[in-house]
Image (cartoon, rainbow, N blue to C red):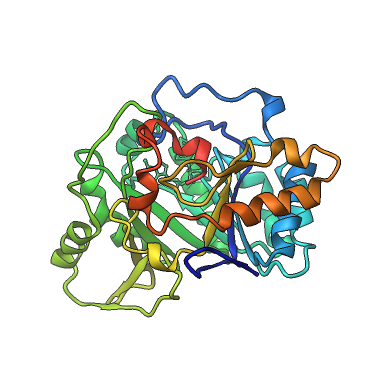
Amino acid sequence: MLVDNHNRTINYLRLAVTDRCNLRCNYCMPAEGISFVKNEKLLTIDELKTVAEVLVDQGVDKIRITGGEPFVRKDIMVLLRHLTKLKGLDDISVTTNATLIGPHIDELKALGIKNINVSLDAIDRATFERITRRNQYDTVHENLIRLVSEGFNVRINFIVLDGQNEQDIVPILEVMKHYPVSVRFLEEMPFNGGSKSFQTIKWNYKAILDHITTHFPSYKKLVSPDTSTSINYQIEGHQSTFGLIPSFSRTFCGSCNRLRVTATGDVITCLYGKPKANLRDLVRGANAETDVKTAILNAVGSRAKTGFDAQKEHAHVFDNSMTSIGG
Ligand code: SAM
Ligand code: SF4
């Protein structure tokens, strides 16, 4: 079992498989993109397998595949097929923009990969296209409907962006009320490749809740697991639920159970801190498993207590983009 220096058990890995993406969401990347790393700097599928195996051996029982956009990687299904065979790994999930998932839906279902998070920050076409800077609205909606009707456990991630999509908060809940999905509203974080920085946000989780409950006064709070980053609710008469993720306010650090490995092998023990190790050379070396294991143990043994503490580790925390970190 992996336990950090603040006695928190780490059992959840967020594994980014690429930094590339076919969208340019304006909260994640500048319009021109970021400078994507060279192919040889990305972990190969075999290297990703080794990293996952070592971590599962150390007690990780939940892996979320993220990116960049995981499905821009042509060999992504090779990794997913392998992960489903790992003993001790109980939960494999994927975070996607749902543009390229279509051809893989049947196989994902057959593999038993049920938990899919879809990033969708607008229900209105023009707003979607303005935010993502791409013309993929119909594909995303088609794939979303397919995922829901095929019985996947779908969670929609909607980042509330001041002046851009607050007018879609109530409409997305109105549309989704007929479906068994969870709509999670996230606070925006200034990780968009350095073109934007801010100290406070208008749409913090309390403001989002106020906005929603003004429109839907009959709702109840749901019981959520201790390690959940979302505070969850259900509106009376709605099949869907909704959640609030205080990603900028950071109220959940005390129960943080997660570790991130980026597509280039950086080990990130807190989203707001500096990478604590890099696994790429280790996993390419002669003693891959032992060296990766040791690096992970060292990283987990020196975790910051909170995101605010981690942020003090470096001056330019917000120069990075979520497409490199994996969200
Ligand atoms: N491309 C996939 C997608 O969009 O779902 C996976 C990668 S994306 C970087 C992972 C998550 O990070 C998404 O849910 C996205 O909304 C979130 N994200 C990206 N930039 C963010 C920001 N500046 N603040 C908060 N969340 C962000
Ligand atoms: Fe791509 Fe996801 Fe970033 Fe949007 S949030 S640009 S879909 S990586």
Question: 210 or 219: which is nearer to us?
Answer: 210
Q: Is residue 8 visible?
A: yes
- The mark tally for this picture is 0
Q: Taking 209 as reference, is 319 left or right?
A: right
Q: Taking 187 as reference, is 200 left or right?
A: left
- Compared with 74, 186 (above or below) is below
- Compared with 234, 44 (above or below) is above
Quadrant where the N terminus is found in the figure: bottom right
Residue 76 percent across, percent down from the top left: 70, 43
Residue 209 percent across, percent down from the top left: 21, 63
Ligand 1 - quadrant of the structure image: top left
List the single residue furthest toward the right.
286
User: Could you tell me which residue is drawn at 70 percent across and 37 percent down?
Assistant: 280
Question: 100 or 307: which is nearer to us?
Answer: 307
User: Could you tell me which residue is drawn at 40 percent across and 29 percent down?
Assistant: 193
- Compared with 238, 92 (above or below) is above
Question: 88 or 121: which is nearer to us?
Answer: 88
User: Could you tell me which residue is drawn at 72 percent across and 49 percent down?
Assistant: 292
Question: 200 or 134: which is nearer to us?
Answer: 200
Q: Is residue 74 visible?
A: no
Q: Taking 316 as reference, is 139 left or right?
A: right
Residue 319 percent across, percent down from the top left: 39, 30
Q: In the rendered image, which quarter is residue 125 located in?
A: top left
Residue 216 percent across, percent down from the top left: 19, 69
List the single residue furthest toward the left.
214
Q: In the rendered image, which quarter is residue 220 located in?
A: bottom left
